Amino acid sequence: MLENAALLGMSHEQVAASLAEAQPVRTPRRLSSGALGSLRVPDALCEGAHFEQTLFFAHQKLTQMDLVLISPGAEEALGRIQAALLQSLRARLGPELAAGDSASWVSADADVMLFRSGRPEHPSLRVVIKQRQLVDAGEL
């Protein structure tokens, strides 16, 4: 999962060439940032769990990757997967900033977030890896 963070900043063509399993998205989704989700990896394996990965591009460069757990199953299974992801991310990135059911890290030029998503009766896990954007105080 984190190894793909090296793709951030690459063009659509470079990412497609680097990820053989990437496919075009049927109905692209646009984020509030303007980034367009135009590629997907239908089954990305991470810590033994299966995720659907969507790759978002802005200004012709990869700016964000979203991974959503496929078929999370019962609450107990979801808790186990979340704990495994937390352990793995802590081992690679150090202690997290935690708030409720979410955790985040800063890694080089990327922000990494792990959180629960979905409806209460159908919870899921989501991992977001996005290119870090530093903003000058004058731009706020």
Image (spheres, rainbow, N blue to C red):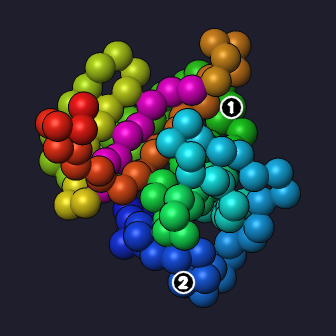
Which element is circle 2 on?
A: helix
The N terminus lies in quadrant: bottom left
* Residue 46 locus on image (x, y percent): 50, 57
Badge 2, how many Cα within 10 Å: few under 14, some, many 20+? few
Q: Determine the image quadrant of residue 42.
A: bottom right
Please, what is the three-letter code of the amino acid marked with disc 1?
A: Gly
Mark 2 or mark 1: which is in front?
2
Q: How many marks?
A: 2
Looking at the picture, tell me which residue is in the foreground, 126 or 79: 126
- Mark 2–mark 1 CB contact (< 8 Å): no
Q: Taking 101 as reference, is 69 left or right?
A: right
The disc placed on residue 99 is none
Which element is circle 1 on?
A: loop
Spot the residue most to the top: 120
* Residue 117 locus on image (x, y percent): 57, 26
Q: Determine the image quadrant of residue 87.
A: top left
Tell me: residue 74, above or below residue 18: above
Q: What span is in magenta?
A: 110-117
The disc placed on residue 14 is 2
- Looking at the image, which residue is at 57% across and 56% down? 56
Task: Check disc 1 and report the residue beneath it.
Answer: 73
- Residue 49, visible in the rendered structure: no
Tell me: residue 102, above or below residue 9: above
Spot the residue most to the right: 26
